[in-house]
Image: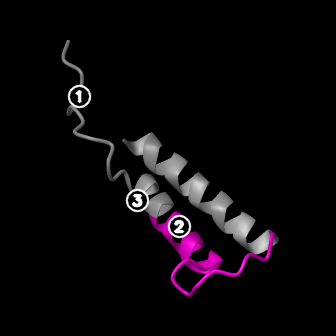
Amino acid sequence: MSIMLAIISAVLFFISFLINAADISTNDTFSSTNIMLLGLMALALHVAGIGSGWSVGGRRR
């Protein structure tokens, strides 16, 4: 799940770039800035470790 957040953020950044580079007119909800902010949120969750699941405390020998 953690790697999925990184992929989602990369896709959102790419969509934001395409909207900005192609100068596509969208409404205020789907502006390139808002999509970029969603990508930053997904990236922040990935870096914070959200969605990585439960981890075992350590290895037993």
User: Counting residues from the N terminus, which is met first, the one under dot 3 or under dot 2?
Assistant: 2
Q: Could you give the CA–CA distance between mark 1 and mark 2, rounded to whole angstroms?
A: 31 Å
Could you tell whether 31 is left or right of 52 in the image?
right
Q: Position of residue 43 (x, y in %)?
A: 50, 59
Q: Quadrant of the C terminus?
A: top left
Is 58 rendered above or below residue 18? above
User: Counting residues from the N terminus, which is met first, the one under dot 1 or under dot 3?
Assistant: 3
Is 8 rendered above or below residue 12? above
Image point (21%, 31%), residue name? 56
Kind of residue at disc 3 = Leu
- The span picked out in magenta is 22-41
Kind of residue at disc 2 = Leu
Could you tell whether 11 is left or right of 20 in the image?
left
Which residue bears the numbered disc 1? Answer: 58
Local packing at callout 2 (Cα closer than 10 Å; few below 14, some 14-19, many 20+) is some
Local packing at callout 1 (Cα closer than 10 Å; few below 14, some 14-19, many 20+) is few
- Name the residue nearer the viewer: 27 or 57: 27
Could you tell whether 36 is left or right of 8 in the image?
right
Which residue bears the numbered disc 2? Answer: 40
Q: Which mark is residue 45?
A: 3
